[in-house]
Amino acid sequence: MLRTLSRVSELPLIVKQLQKNAAQAGVAKTNNYATEATVQVNRPFKLHRLDEGPATEVKLTKDEALKYYTQMQTIRRIETAAGNLYKEKIIRGFCHLYSGQEACAVGMKAAMRDVDNIISAYRVHGWTYLMGVSPIGVLAELTGAQSGCARGKGGSMHMYAPNFFGGNGIVGAQVPLGTGVGLACKYKGNGGMCLALYGDGAANQGQVFEAYNMAYLWKLPVIFVCENNNYGMGTSSERASCNTDYYTRGDALPGIWVDGMDVLAVRSATEFAINYVNTVGPLVMETNTYRYSGHSMSDPGTSYRTREEIQEVRQKRDPITSFKELCIELGLITTDEVKAIDLKVRKEIDEATAFAKSDAELAVSHLWTDVSSNNLETKLRGTNSFNLDHIQERKGVNH
């Protein structure tokens, strides 16, 4: 995934020379424990209409290593729990899992600032957690319970949080919405931007190209992110797209290809992109990644690819395992710390799962609350025969 470039330590010169000759991984150290490492991206970035790209040498601190590993492991556990709850028929409706793509979300979130925004499609359980919703809030929303982030009304595809505009069920429709969020940032002059995420399947939607065009003409601070997991809903990208270099498909918009299985590469690319869209204009970023599960829970995911292919990616390119091994090699994380994180995350998600299974649903009278954020009429429109009052409770995360 990444390799070490340099070592800085306070050990005697002869010891450092021996370590260098032995090509051992090295970093800045305190009391023989690594505190920071400088590493280089192994898979180079690909550029479209750019003279220079993201930094290929990146720094990683111990605190960052612990944080990113914990976040990716938590997302993986949440998705495993969601899959099991669906099989138990406790989660109903649509459910799309993010397992295998964790480095994309964690890498992008690591580069985001407080003024930045994100909007995505329907594979957003992990993003909901990263944007501030607890695992209980995510899993309870999936089970339709009142402790969910949208009080159980949204479900898998409609979760929200501050600066997170969801979960959107219509394929590709979030892209023009994200362009609008970018317009709002420019209008307010707050220095923020918007990550507008979509998949390789949605990349062929006409509204995506309309959004490209408007964003370019108005020089909006939008990063169009194609999370290319190589398969749409049962169709490989090669069979669905005449041009699978999605980072080039913005035409006049510059583009970046990044290894989406490498959290540090994604972070570096996103940092570059944020600076670019705030100083020049919109940009397309393709994160090449892989999903282990089917498109949704109704898709076994093995009719259009082999089990051997999935297993090979798990063994050779898994974003969590690769990052863990890198951090241990660098001395940023010990095996004991990894075990402690794994146990803590497992306990947290197990408890959240149990709570989500036992939590109550909203009473029927709460189902039509908060229809509008600021309703100008006392009655709800279109329900005259029911004579329903508009009630604002504002108890959801998105209220």
Image (spheres, grey):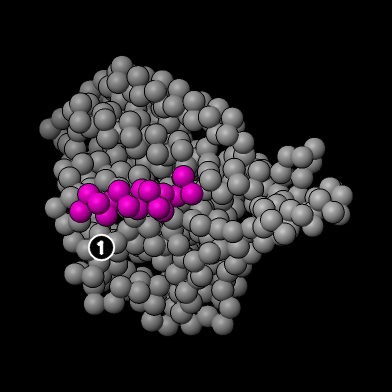
Q: Residues within 10 Å of mark 1 (few under 14, many from 20)?
A: many
> Which residue appears at 25% of the width and 66% of the height?
237
**Residue 61 at what x, y percent from top left?**
67, 47
Residue 125 is one of the magenta-drawn residues: no
Q: Is residue 364 above or below residue 263?
A: above
Residue matched to label 1: 201
Name the image quarter holding residue 16: bottom right
> Which residue appears at 70% of the width and 52% of the height?
26
> Which residue appears at 35% of the width and 74% of the height?
245
Q: Is residue 384 left or right of residue 308?
A: left
Q: Is residue 277 left or right of residue 214?
A: right
**Residue 292 at what x, y percent from top left?**
30, 48
**Magenta residues: mostly which secondary structure?**
helix
> Which residue appears at 23% of the width and 70% of the height?
238
Q: Is residue 292 left or right of residue 258?
A: left
Kind of residue indicated by mark 1: Gly
Is residue 76 something one can see in this rendering?
yes
Q: Where is the C terminus found, in terms of image quarters?
A: top left
Q: Which residues are magenta?
A: 306-322
Q: Nearer the viewer, residue 103 or 363?
A: 103
Is residue 153 something one can see in this rendering?
no
